[in-house]
Amino acid sequence: MVVITEARHTSPEVGEGWKGSRCNVIATTPTTLHDLLHAMGMKTDEPLGDSNFSVPVWRVRAGAVLQHEGARSEFVHVVRAGTFKCLKTSEDGYEQVLSFAAPGDVLGFEAVCRGRHVSSVVALEDSTVFMLPLRDLSRWRQLSPALDQALQYALSRQLARAGEIAEMMAAVAAEVRLARFLEWLSNSMADRGQSPWRLYLRMSRRDIASLLGVAHETVSRSFGALAEWGYLKVDNRSVEIIDAAGLHACTRSTRGMADEAPRRPAAAGRHRAAVAMAA
């Protein structure tokens, strides 16, 4: 039996920056292996063997750093609720967003081989995560084949998503990149049983621009274009896909321009007042 009642997220390399934000990442009531597997998309009616895990859960405030780039790794995190962004900071201080993480996603697994985190992870909203201590992870996986299977499935899913993000970057036009991002986000929402048509963007325009490799202002203009072409309705961070077929047609223009895709007629400027999203 493996029982953990408390987890301490301490790392000497983090320094004063972590101490200043530690109140934003706090331990809460531990939960069961059953809850962890459910969050990772595994069937909870399957037998779990003789293992009885008490899994630490941490609450992460919006804007708090869960994982610091370059810090020694002590935990693998699994998102229980909420949204995170994963980013790297270049030598000139630019923050490059690499991906977004949602419930069921695994964070920090790359540190299993490297011993240190290769990216930072920041909460985009108040969130909770399961904490899997690296020192116990191999033993937990041996004791619970269901946990081992869940980790393999989650990591396979994330590898597939990484390929999808690479496909977004292959498009020439910024509008096409944004259309591919919105379609990817829509599919991700559908996979989690949520509406694929009504999206609420937890990430800012600046985060989206960083992920897509375009300027912040370009993302704003691209939202305006997709709305004027009749694919979307945009109100602040709320996005409604009103022409999924047209949006998908736009995503096909890999080497061409977005204006080559068919679109619904829409009066110029019809949606311009609605496309100002919160930064």
Image (cartoon, grey):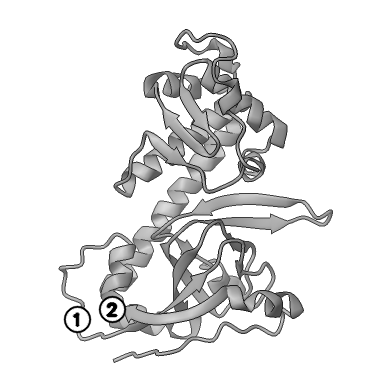
Q: Residues within 10 Å of mark 2 (few under 14, many from 20)?
A: many
In the rendered picture of this protein, how many numbered marks are placed on residues? 2
Q: Is residue 252 above or below residue 3?
A: above
Question: Residue 249 appears in which quarter of the rendering?
Answer: top left
Q: Is residue 171 visible?
A: no
Q: Residue at 29% across / 59% down in the picture?
A: 41
Q: Is residue 149 above or below residue 88?
A: below
Q: Is residue 24 above or below residue 174?
A: below
Q: Is residue 249 visible?
A: yes
Residue at the spot of label 2: 144
Circles 2 and 1 in contact, beta carbons < 8 Å: yes
Q: CA distance from mark 2 to mark 1?
A: 7 Å
Q: Residue at 45% across / 68% down in the picture?
A: 128
Q: Position of residue 247 (x, y in %)?
A: 45, 23
Residue 29 relative to residue 9: left or right? left
Residue at the spot of label 1: 49
**Identity, as a three-letter code, of the amino acid under mark 2:** Ser
Residue 66 relative to residue 18: left or right? left
